[in-house]
Image (cartoon, rainbow, N blue to C red):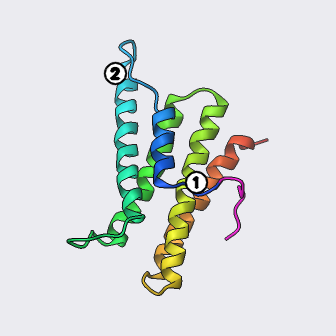
Amino acid sequence: MPSAFPDIKPLKPEDVEAFAAKRVPPVLESDSVEKKILKAKLRVALNQIANEFASLHMTHTGPPPPPYEATTPELLRSVREAVATALLLVDRPEDRRAWLEFGVGVCKTIEEIFVERVKRGIERPSMAWLVRRYRLDAELTRIALEFPPGK
């Protein structure tokens, strides 16, 4: 599927954790209550992303995991929410770009996984379409950074 950002590569689970470790702002004593809550919300979303994202890459043993159609929509919403929350916390254009590209990279990985699962006949095409819509939304949001409405 074409991408407006072919240079943004799909992320691996370890990339998600490394990005979070580098980009999540620390909670400061001087932060307002709102800012402290936003930072906590961002950490929760990133923990959920890391956990669910890693499970997409694992070979499961033991009890079967929840079906992907139950967990993937929530994972995609968490990616969108983490990026939106981070954008409320950062001011520098390069930080905004990094968070927007993080969203695109995670969605590209999830899309790759589901397209492959559809090709193998183990997933419904509608799941790949859902994931693709989220990736395209992430790309549109990234484009808006370069080309704000009205410019």
The amino acid at mark 1 is Gly
The amino acid at mark 2 is Val
The image quarter in which residue 34 lies = top left
Q: Tell me where the magenta segment starts and ends, as one range.
A: 1-8
Q: CA distance from mark 2 to mark 1?
A: 31 Å
Label 1 sits on residue: 105
Is 17 drawn above or below residue 3 in the view shown? above
Disc sitting over residue 33 in the figure: 2
| Left or right side of 83 for 31 | left
Query: Residue reaching furthest top?
Result: 30
| Left or right side of 1 for 58 | left
Q: Residues within 10 Å of mark 2 (few under 14, many from 20)?
A: few
Secondary structure, mark 1, is helix
Is 121 drawn above or below residue 60 in the view shown? below
Q: Position of residue 125 (x, y in %)?
A: 50, 81
Question: Which image quadrant: the N terminus?
Answer: bottom right
Q: Main secondary structure of the magenta part?
A: loop
